[in-house]
Image: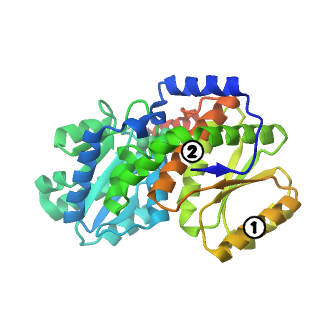
């Protein structure tokens, strides 16, 4: 069970109202999902993962933002064992990166999991075209179509239409779950299963968190709100495990896209210690005092634990509020709990500052402007 080491003043009646609002929000589907996951779909995911493992040395995961950060976070943290390696593509518009990914796959056997809820995002669309071409050249059109797995909207979008027309294996991003909240749907579960993550344990951890994470998440959300109102407008997520770099990246996306609206929201940033004690450590200790630090305290070895304790003392003495979130285990169950805990904290936090946790008008604006320029 996730534990926090602080006690915020939680307005219980308001908190209950907010939880009820999130639950009935058109985009609140993630809230109960781990407890009532469709086991038919779960079996299809396992089956597809087994097929990919059998016939591919690489799975190319194409997607951006919420369509890749969450599963990459768990896969890179746990470093599970699998015959199939995951390669990520379509998360930038860098031609260099795309060429590198194509080269890396080289002549190896591969499959593609293209993930895009809207089915129209440019970065994954371009990478998908390039890898699809490679797939067709290698296997011929007919077999290539059996090696493409599309995770997208159930009914609409360019990717959906193409998948139906060509008979790709399809998985659905539920209507009521947005990108950054979709880690525990097929968006995350298929690549994780292929990579060797025990997705049953992951969902088990998340399902437990549906009950057990509520209290610590409310506590944390109200603490963030209080700190923000006192001028602590930047949150540094700190981890002492280098393998969790991508978990930090997902956190930045989750909080940044959910809260950063209408000129409000805490700016999320992240640190990996002790590495960053030798870069940003100076600033944290002694720079502007608008920061608070949230230590994600994974179970660790004795020496690392000493560094956690030393950092806590030093930064507290330096005038930084240091929050501690202790994670019960560094495994699938622990990450299932953690994902759910942060999703819940984030949704409640956004509600507390009066913004919609589930839209991303700023992201949509950039997508629109880019399309307009390209059409010209
Ligand atoms: O969290 C979000 O909603 C976004 O970050 C999206 O995941 C991202 O923009 C990719 O969108 P799509 O899955 O539609 O390609």
Depicted 49 relative to depicted 213: above or below: below
Q: Residue at x 25, y 35 (%)?
A: 161
Q: Horizontal and vertical percent for residue 292?
A: 77, 52
What is the secondary structure assignment of the residue under circle 2? helix
- Residue 141, by quadrant, is bottom left
Residue 7, compared with residue 60, is above or below; it is above
Circle number at residue 309? 1
Which residue shows up at 34% across the image and 63% down it? 196
- Count of numbered circles in the view: 2
Q: Which residue is mark 2?
A: 341
Q: Is residue 333 left or right of residue 196?
A: right
Left or right of 128, for residue 240: right
Disc 1 crowd, CA 10 A, few/some/many (<14, 14-19, 20+): few
- Viewer-closest of 72 and 45: 45
Residue drawn at x 73%, y 42% is: 224
Label 1 SS: helix
Q: Is disc 1 in contact with disc 2, using a CB cutoff of under 8 Å?
A: no
The verdict on label 1 being within 8 Å of ligand 1 is no
């Amino acid at each position: 069970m996730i534990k926090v080491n602080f006690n915020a003043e939680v307005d219980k009646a308001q908190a209950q109202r907010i939880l009820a609002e999130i639950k009935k929000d058109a985009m609140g589907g993630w809230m109960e999902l781990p407890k009532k996951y469709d086991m038919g779909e779960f079996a299809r995911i396992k089956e597809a993962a087994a097929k990919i493992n059998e016939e591919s040395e690489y799975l190319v995961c194409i997607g951006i933002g919420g369509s890749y950060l969450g599963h990459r976070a768990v896969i890179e943290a746990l470093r599970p064992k699998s015959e199939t390696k995951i390669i990520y593509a379509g998360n930038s518009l860098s031609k260099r990166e795309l060429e590198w990914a194509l080269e890396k796959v080289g002549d190896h056997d591969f499959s593609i999991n293209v993930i895009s809820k809207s089915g129209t995002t440019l970065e994954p669309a371009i990478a998908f075209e390039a890898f699809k071409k490679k797939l067709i050249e290698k296997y011929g059109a007919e077999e290539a179509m059996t090696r493409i797995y599309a995770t997208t909207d159930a009914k609409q979008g360019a990717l959906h239409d193409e998948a139906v027309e060509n008979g790709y294996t399809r998985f659905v991003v539920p209507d009521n779950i947005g990108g950054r909240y979709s880690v525990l749907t097929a968006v995350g579960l298929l690549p994780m299963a292929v990579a060797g993550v025990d997705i049953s344990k992951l969902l088990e951890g998340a399902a437990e968190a549906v009950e057990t994470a509520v209290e610590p998440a409310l506590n944390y959300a109200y603490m963030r709100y209080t700190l923000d109102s006192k001028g602590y407008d930047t949150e540094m997520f700190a981890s002492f495990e280098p393998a969790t770099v991508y978990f930090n990246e997902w956190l930045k996306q989750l909080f940044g896209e959910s809260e950063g609206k209408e000129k409000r929201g805490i700016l999320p940033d992240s640190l990996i210690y002790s590495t960053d004690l030798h870069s940003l450590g100076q600033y944290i200790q002694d720079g502007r005092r608008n920061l608070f630090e949230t230590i994600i305290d994974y179970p660790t070895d004795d020496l690392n634990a000493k560094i956690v304790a030393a950092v806590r003392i030093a930064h507290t003495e330096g005038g930084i509020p240091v929050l501690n979130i202790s994670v019960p285990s560094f495994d699938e169950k622990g990450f299932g709990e953690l994902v759910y805990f942060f999703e819940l904290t984030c949704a409640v936090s956004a509600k507390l500052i009066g913004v919609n946790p589930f839209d991303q008008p700023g992201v949509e604006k950039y997508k629109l402007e880019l399309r307009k320029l390209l059409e010209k």
